[in-house]
Amino acid sequence: MKPVIQEELTGCGIAASAALAGVSYAEAKQKANALGIYAADTALWSKTEHARTLLREFGISASSEETPFKSWESLPDKALMAIKWRIERGKPFWHWVVFTREYGGAKVLDSKKALKSNTRTDFGRIKPKWYIEVSN
């Protein structure tokens, strides 16, 4: 699995879905927009239904619950994770990333354009709040 870079400041959910589906950001954005999902929609930043809907459109199954993060070792082989979780103006906000365990190694695919590497293994610096298990 490869990281997909978000092409919009607030497109991390679209980029994470694209990475899980193995498609480009443009393709995921087109599908998201057709479903009424837009990166600029602030509801996308503090709710999970949009991400689940887009994943379902790609044939990817997502857990109906958010599971609190306990440890990197306890994560499933694929997960959509909420990091940089915070409250702003009374609403929760976070940044979506993808956790994957494949070929004997674990990594986080982070869509943030400014990163030197979008494939991360600096787990001590990443502070997940919760995750959604995914499978296809």
Image (tube, rainbow, N blue to C red):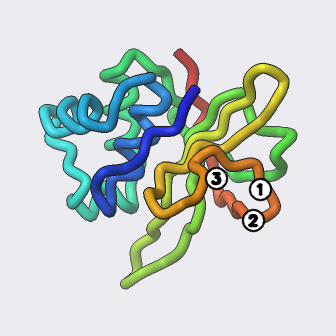
Q: Position of residue 3 (x, y in %)?
A: 52, 38
At mark 2, the secondary structure is helix
Classify mark 3: helix, strand or loop: strand
Q: Tell me how far mark 1 sits from mark 2, CA to CA.
A: 6 Å
Residue under the point 78% across and 55% down:
123
Q: Earlier in the sequence, mark 3 or mark 2?
A: 2
Q: Amino acid at mark 1?
A: Asp
What residue is disc 1 on?
122
As drawn, the residue found furthest toward the bottom would be 89
- Dot label at residue 125: 2
Q: Please give the name of the residue rendered at 49% of the width and 21% of the height, measured from the top-left corner.
A: 61
Front: mark 1 or 3: 1
Element type at marker 1? loop
Going by the numbered disc 2, the residue's amino acid type is Arg
112 or 60: nearer the viewer: 112
In the image, residue 100 above or below residue 60: below
Q: Quadrant of residue 46?
A: bottom left
Q: Is residue 66 visible?
A: no
Q: In the displayed structure, does residue 64 sit left or right of residue 88?
A: right
Q: Where's residue 87, x and y in %? A: 48, 78
Give yes or no for contact between labels 3 and 2 (Cβ–Cβ under 8 Å).
Answer: no
Whether pointer 1 and pointer 2 mark residues with C-beta atoms closer than 8 Å, the reply is: yes
Give the quadrant of residue 77. Answer: top right
Q: Residues within 10 Å of mark 3 (few under 14, many from 20)?
A: some
Query: Which residue shows up at 40% across the image and 42% down it?
Result: 15
Q: Residues within 10 Å of mark 1 (few under 14, many from 20)?
A: few
Q: Is residue 40 visible?
A: yes
